[in-house]
Amino acid sequence: MNGAQSLVATLLASGVDTCFANPGTSEMHFVAALDQSAGLRCVLGLQENVVTGMADGYWRIAGKPACTLLHCGPGLANGIANLHNARRARSGIVNIVGDQATWHRPYDPPLSADTEGLARTVSAWVRTSTHAADVGRDAAAAVQAARTAPGQVATLILPSDASWDEGGLVGEPLPVPAPPAFDGFAIENAARVLRSGQPTLILLAGGGVRGESQALAWRIAQATGAQLMADYMNAHVERGRGRLQLERTPYNTDLAMEAFARFEHILLVGAKPPVAFFAYPGKPSMQAPSNAQLHVVTRPEQDAAAALRALAETLGAKQVPLPDPGPRPQAASGAPAPDKVAQTIAALMPEHSIVSDESVSFGRGFYKHSHAAPQHDWLHLVGGAIGAGLPVATGAALAGGGRRVISLQADGSAMYSLQALWTQAREKLPCTTVLLNNRKYAILQGEYRSVGATPGPTALRMLDLGDPDLGWVQLAAGMGVEGARASTMEECADLLARSFRQPGPFVIELMV
C-alpha cells in the first residue's frame, strides 16, 4: 500500500465518502487510488473555488465533512475565497493539497509556494505529511479536526513522494470531541436579565436558528417579553411553515442601529456581538447602543438547543405553539421586484427545498415574504466573499438526496464561479438557479453613498455589467445547462414550475 491508498482507506474508515476535486500532477496517485477503493465518490469542479464552495454546501446539509483535492499552493490559493466563507460558516472540510516531492522542493520548481502559510489563513488545523507511513495517521487527525464542533477547515498537505512511496498504513478513525457544555452561570445570568423586565433582545445564530432552538427561544420570549432576531450572517436557517418567523439583523448600519437602539440587554445565543460589515465615516463599528449590556449565553461551539432548554426550564417557560405565518402566498405578477420574487418562490417551491442565497442587495428583504412557504433550509453567504452561491448550491444538492435546490443568485457574483453549472449538469443535480440580472454591481452603488464618496462617469462604468451584456441563457448552455429568460413574474413562475418538474439543472435569467 502506498501513501495515497492509505489516505483513501483512512478517509473512508473515518466516514468521509465524498471528494470534490480539481487535481494536478502531484495528486495523480490519489486519483489512481480512487479506482482501487470503492466507496469514495469523486466530483470534479472546473475551478478550485467551485471545489471548496461545494465542500462548504455539502457540510451545511450533510452535517459531515467532505474532502477537497487541490493542486499545490496555487490551487489552494484559487480556492481560498470560498474556504474563507466556509470558515466563517463554521463548515467542516478536509482539504487534501498535493505538493512538490520533499526532495524536489529545494530546487524551487515553478509551482513551489508557501502552501502551509496559505492554508493557515483559512484553516483551524494544518499539517504536512512527509512520509508515506504518516499519511493515514495524519488523515484521521484531519477528519477529527474538521468534525470538531461547530465544524472546522482542516488542511493536509501531501508531498507527492508521500503519496507514491510504499509503506502506507490505514489510520484508525479518531473520536469526535464532544462539544463543550454550556455554562450554567451564563444560563443563570440570562434568566436574571430576562426576569428584570428591562428591554431585552435574544440574538440567535448558528445552532440557535435551527428548528428546536427556535421553538425554545419562542417559549422564552413569550414568558418574558424578550424580542427575538436572527443574526444577519447565518450559514443554515430552518424556515417555512412550522418554524419561527424570524427576521434578520439589517445589513445597513443605520437600520441595524435603529433596530438595536431600544434594547438595554442583548443575549447572544451562538452569535457574535453585532458589528457593521464595513467601517463608514462617522459611524461606530458596533451596531448595538453603547449603553447596552451584551451577555454570552452560548458560544458557537456549544449546544444552543441544550442551553435554551435549560434557560426555559429555569424560567418556567411553558410550551407554546409557534405563530401561524398565514396562508401560503400566490405567485406574483407584473414587473420583477424583490418582494414579488420572494413571494413567487414561496408560492411554488417544493416541500423541503434548499435555498442557496447569494442574491446580495436584491434579496435582503426576502424573509418577510417567504415565512409561509413549505418547510425549507436557507443557506446564506456568510463570509462576504462573493462567488459562493452556485458552488454551495451544488454541494448542497449532492448532500440533499434529491431535494430541490434553488439558487437565488446575483449576476455579478455568479461570474466568479459559473463553472459550478457544469458540475450540476455533469452530476444531473436538481438545481434551479434564478439569476437576478440587473447588469450592474448594485450593492456597490449603495456602498458609494454609505462611505460618502461621489462617483463620476468613470466610477459608475466600473459598476456597469451591461457593456457588453452577459447572456446567462447562453452561458448556461455553454455549461450544458438548459435555461430561459423571464422579464415578468408570470414568465418567472412558469419557468420555476417547469424547472421543478425536471430532474436536472435549469437556469432562469430574470431581468430585474
Image (spheres, rainbow, N blue to C red):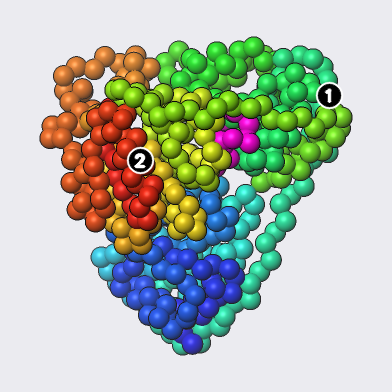
Disc 2 marks a residue whose amino acid type is Leu
Q: Which residue is mark 1?
A: 192
Q: Tell me the kind of residue under disc 1.
A: Arg
Residues shaded magenta = 231-246
Q: Residue at x 58, y 55 (%)?
A: 63
Mark linked to residue 370? none
Answer whether residue 199 is magenta in the image: no
Question: In which quarter of the view is residue 68 placed?
Answer: bottom left
For the stretch drawn in magenta, the main secondary structure is loop
Q: Quadrant of the C terminus?
A: top left
Tell me which residue sits at (83%, 30%) in the image: 318
User: Which structural element holds mark 1?
Assistant: helix
Can residue 217 be seen? no
Above or below, 438 relative to 175: above
Q: Nearer the viewer, residue 393 or 71?
A: 393
Q: Is residue 508 visible?
A: yes
Residue density around tag 2, few if under 14, some if 14–19, many if 20 or more, within 10 Å: many
Expressed as whole percent of the image width and height from the top left, the position of residue 448 reads 32, 19
Q: Answer few, some or many: residues within 10 Å of disc 1's Cα (few below 14, many 20 plus, some between 14 and 19).
A: few
